[in-house]
Amino acid sequence: MTGHIRIVNDPVELVPLLITFNDSKYKQIYELLNKTWLSEEELAQQLHHQGVGECIQLLKKGNLIEEQWRMPAPGQKPVREYRATYSKFRANFQCNMSDLSDLLYLSVSNDETLRAVVEQVEGEIEQGNVSINDLARKFDVSPMFIRGLAKRSHKMDVKGQGLVLLDGTR
């Protein structure tokens, strides 16, 4: 593993990190990818559990892994394989405590009300309301909360000052 450093300048980028390391399955996947290149299928076989695809999607969203195509044996299809990108971490940001508390809550909470908010935000995006600030006003939360919610979700992501729905092929 190289000595690449994950520099976090935006506190929202903590959300995928905290989700990954707060879930024992996700943490195991990250640790395996920290050692070698593995495909999604190889990870599922080694760990004997579901959810590897969701974890890979979250790790990609957090820019924590890199991917490449594995050259197949003759007559076989190429397979994507993954590996952890960073071996060190550095935070370089400042935010108010309210925003930090929102991000920590979003990262470690299993609150069912979050699911309802995510679904409402996704509905707004489908209707064309993609502005982070407009969504924050509509749901009476901070823009940081909306951005953190998008980083937590498997269906949406932050692009500039707006949100986008992911098509699942990312």
Image (cartoon, rainbow, N blue to C red):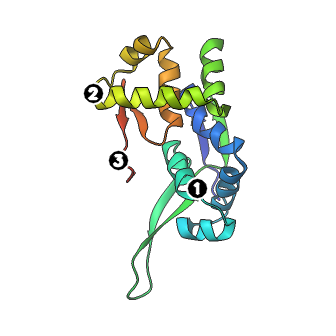
**Residue that appears at 66% across and 39% down:** 89
Q: Which mark is residue 99?
A: none
Closer-to-camera residue (162/123): 123
The quadrant the N terminus occupies is: bottom right
Quickly name the residue at label 2.
Answer: 127
Image height of 2 relative to 114, above or below: below
* Callout 1 secondary element: loop
Foreground disc of the pair 3, 2: 2
Quickly name the residue at label 3.
Answer: 167
Task: Tell me which amino acid carries mark 3.
Answer: Asp
User: What is the C-alpha distance between the residues marked 3 and 2?
Assistant: 16 Å
Task: Tell me which amino acid carries mark 2.
Answer: Gln
Quickly name the residue at label 1.
Answer: 51
**Residue that appears at 35% across and 47% down:** 167
Mark positioned earlier in the residue sequence (3 or 1): 1
Closer-to-camera residue (29/7): 29
Q: Answer yes or no: is residue 9 visible.
A: no
User: How far from the left and from the top, in percent, is residue 113?
Assistant: 57, 26
* Callout 2 secondary element: loop
Q: How crowded is mark 1: few (under 14 residues within 10 Å), some or many (20 or more)?
A: few
User: What is the C-alpha distance between the residues marked 2 and 1?
Assistant: 30 Å
Residue 159 vs residue 91: left or right? left
Image height of 164 relative to 170, above or below: above
Closer-to-camera residue (11/115): 115
User: How far from the left and from the top, in percent, is residue 169?
Assistant: 37, 54
User: How far from the left and from the top, in percent, is residue 116?
Assistant: 50, 28
**Residue that appears at 61% across and 20% down:** 102
Task: Tell me which amino acid carries mark 1.
Answer: Gly
**Residue that appears at 39% across and 78% down:** 77
Q: In which quarter of the image is residue 108?
A: top right
User: What is the C-alpha distance between the residues marked 3 and 1?
Assistant: 18 Å
